[in-house]
Amino acid sequence: MAFRGLLFAIIPSAVLLSAWSATVPLPDPESLPEDASSVGKRTSRAQQKPGVFREYPGWEYNNFPIPPDCDVPGEWVFARFMYRAVYGWRGGRGPNWTIDYPRSDRHLSAAVRRLTRIQTRSVEQPVAAEDGDDIYNWPWLYAVEVGHWDLTDLQAAKLRDFLDRGGFFMCDDFHGTLEWEVFEASMRKVFPDRPIVDLPDSDPIFHSVYDLDGRYQVPGEQFVYSHRTYEKDGYQPRWRGIYDGKGRLVVAICHNMDLGDSWEHADNPEYPEQYSALGFRIGVNYLVYAMTH
């Protein structure tokens, strides 16, 4: 591993202890800064400090139980990317980035504790590009419903800088042609010069912990009612990504599947176990790959 990558993977483990914070109001997307000219420039130590743990009102959950060990630091934290969405705040119930939040995040964190030796914090971390240099403290970043995102210039520039410094980004839960086009439009703002490619079965990300040659489409909770693994015209799961100049995967794109729901509903007896089992294995492989590459 490159020295920079080693530092990026290890240093956060010493600073991931975040004070507990009560639920705070959602930021107004119209008031967020959009100027990207300061991205990558020298900042103060105050701006570089990791943000404290806080909760926001979610699309589905507003009072999900907080684990009693939420203030115990970890080597790895589920960091959820906050972004501006095409369709706004969905009638006041929460923006698209809060779908499955925080139940999905905490279930995956619990699974990582059980399935690996990684010291994992029990609660997630919402991460905003506008919040100083906080994004650089969380080397594994996840976004959901990216078929609805509409990145500002600042968000796109900060995400690219985060990835160029050694970060890893995983996105999930978007389906069909239209949502792909919406996703791709913003992703091209992040990396206009790097292609999105299909990942071969031989890629190391599918073999970092589990051998995942035999993958299949992981549906959302809607499968319980519809008995369909697909949504919209997203009939086939697409495992895609973006590599850096040294051939390392830095963006993992899970299209036409809903891994977030597979984590969220792992304790739902009506949701098939086989999908949660694969969903957890994919999540573990992706984060272990991110921490070792």
Image (cartoon, rainbow, N blue to C red):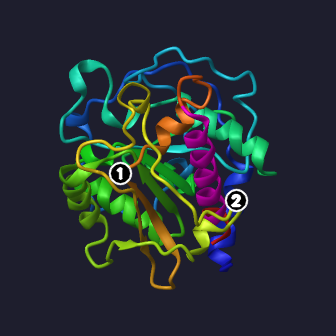
Query: Height in image: 100 above or below 279?
Result: above
Which residue reaches farthest top?
63
**Residue 86 x %, y %:** 19, 41
Q: Disc 1 marks which residue? A: 256
**Residue 130 x %, y %:** 36, 46
Residue 82 is inside the magenta segment: no
Q: Secondary structure at mark 2?
A: helix
Q: Which mark is residue 213?
A: none
Q: Amino acid at mark 1?
A: Asn
**Residue 278 x %, y %:** 59, 48
Task: Identify the residue shown where x is 65% and y is 53%.
Answer: 284
Indicate which disc, 1 or 2, sits on the residue closer to the N terminus. 2
Q: Quadrant of the N terminus?
A: bottom right
282 sits left or right of 76 in the view: left
266 sits left or right of 41 in the view: right
Q: Amino acid at mark 2?
A: Ile
Start and end of the magenta stretch? 272-289
Q: Could you tell me if residue 243 is visible in this image?
A: yes
Q: Quadrant of the C terminus?
A: bottom right
Which residue reaches farthest right?
117
Query: Which of 245 and 198 lies nearest the eye of the viewer?
Result: 198
Q: Residues within 10 Å of mark 2 (few under 14, many from 20)?
A: few
Q: Residues within 10 Å of mark 1 (few under 14, many from 20)?
A: many
Q: Secondary structure at mark 1?
A: loop
Q: Disc 2 marks which residue? A: 11
Task: Identify the residue shown where x is 70% and y is 40%.
Answer: 111
101 sits left or right of 122 in the view: left
Query: Which of 213 and 8 lies nearest the eye of the viewer?
Result: 213
Query: Which of 81 and 251 lies nearest the eye of the viewer?
Result: 251
Task: Identify the residue shown where x is 50% and y is 49%.
Answer: 134
Q: Quadrant of residue 58?
A: top left
Query: Height in image: 150 above or below 289?
Result: above
